[in-house]
Image (spheres, rainbow, N blue to C red):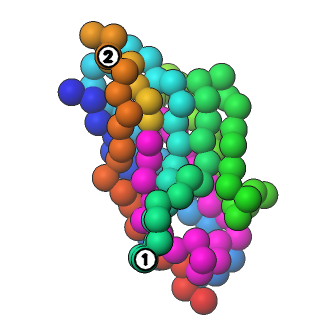
Amino acid sequence: QVQLVESGGGLVQAGGSLRLSCAASGSIFSINAMGWFRQAPGKERELVADISSGGSTNYADSVKGRFTISRDNAKNTVYLQLNSLTPEDTAVYYCNAVVVTKSLNTCNLWGQGTQVTVSS
C-alpha cells in the first residue's frame, strides 16, 4: 500500500502565502517525478508544477515567479510554496507522484486534494 497525504491548504487574502505538503508513505522503493495539479470549479485539472528525481522543475506560466516546488527525498515529501496569491489561484490542489514500490511496480498516485481559497 502506497498513498499520498496532502496538507497546508486554507483561506488566505490576496497577496498572501501558503505552503502545501504532500507525503508519500507505504512500501516505497523510490519516487520518480512529483508534482502539483489544481482544479477550479468548471475547469479541467491543470499542471501547476513538477519536479524530477534529480531536482529539475517545471512551472505553469501562470505561477512562474510566484510558486516554488521542492522535495525532500529522505522524507518522501514534496512541497509547494505559494506566494503572491490571487483569487485566480483558488482551486483544489492535488499532489501527484510516480512511485516505484518495493515489489518494483510503478504507480501513478494522487493525493486526496487540499482546498486553497484566496479572497479579494
Q: Where's residue 95, x and y in %?
A: 44, 47
Please tell me whether mark 2 sits on a helix, a strand or a loop: loop
Location of the N terminus by quadrant is: top left
Q: Residue type at mark 1?
A: Gly
Q: Is residue 100 left or right of residue 90?
A: left
Q: In the image, which residues are magenta?
A: 77-96
Q: Residue type at mark 2?
A: Asn
Q: Is residue 114 left or right of residue 35?
A: left
Q: Where's residue 47, x and y in %?
A: 56, 52
Q: Which residue is painted at 43% across and 53% down in the image?
A: 94
Location of the C terminus by quadrant is: bottom right
Which residue is disc 2 drawn over? 105
Q: Which residue is painted at 40% across and 25% down in the image?
A: 99
Number of marks in the rendered image:
2
Q: Where's residue 80, x and y in %?
A: 57, 50
Residue 9 shows up from this direction: no
Q: Is residue 109 left or right of residue 72?
A: left
Which residue is disc 1 drawn over? 42
Please tell me whether mark 1 sits on a helix, a strand or a loop: loop
